[in-house]
Amino acid sequence: KIKTSTAVERNTNIDSTLIAEDVLDSVSMLLTDKDDREVAHVVTGERLNVTIEATFKMTLNDPHVGFGVRNKDGLKIYESNTFCLNQSIGSLHAMTPLRVTFSFDCHLGEGDFALVVGLANGGFNRGNFHEVIYLEQDYKVLKVICSDRDVWTGFFNLQPSIEVQRVT
């Protein structure tokens, strides 16, 4: 059974909410490294691929896929989707698997983070959707570990440039 989130029902930025069981056949998330090997954790600064695959039971005219990262307290660290990132998928026929991969250098601080999955149809304005199909706030846990290269603390590594001058 596909789990739905009550957060979808409370979202006031949508025209209607579809019931996931009626529209969504399957959804999965895979985390891989720069060499496309499946990983359970990532070292700060390394490349991470977040692949979401979904199959819908009905044809969608404007499907979109999104993901997010939240800390242990539920604070949103990052969240976006194909619509907000100007990536059009186009019409998708029923039962056609869709795979979307988000790739980035993971500069999060050490810890465990919840990965969010969102699936919607009909994007408009600045990130609103006519139909929210699926939204799961805690789909998968991402474990981030720090390397010994740099020492820092916080939510993410700003990777500052450093310039030192001796002023005489």
Image (cartoon, rainbow, N blue to C red):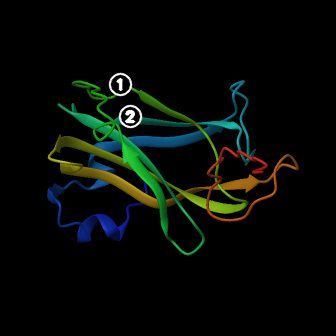
Residue located at (14% from left, 57% from top): 16
Closer to the chain start, of discs 1 and 2, is 2
Q: Is residue 64 above or below residue 89?
A: below
The foreground one among 46 and 42 is 46
| Residue to which mark 1 is pinned | 96
Element type where label 1 sits in the image: loop
Asked if disc 1 and disc 2 are in contact, CB closer than 8 Å, the reply is: yes
Q: Is residue 133 above or below residue 89?
A: below
For this view, does 168 lie left or right of residue 119? right
For this orientation, the residue located farthest to the left is 15
Q: Residues within 10 Å of mark 2 (few under 14, many from 20)?
A: some
For this orientation, the residue located farthest to the front is 168
For this view, does 150 lie left or right of residue 26? right
Element type where label 2 sits in the image: strand
State which quadrant residue 64 falls in: top left
State which quadrant residue 105 falls in: top right
| Residue to which mark 2 is pinned | 55
Q: Residues within 10 Å of mark 1 (few under 14, many from 20)?
A: few
Look at the image and tell me whether residue 42 can be seen. yes
Q: Amino acid at mark 1?
A: Thr
Q: Position of residue 1 (x, y in %)?
A: 45, 55
Q: Position of residue 98 (x, y in %)?
A: 40, 28
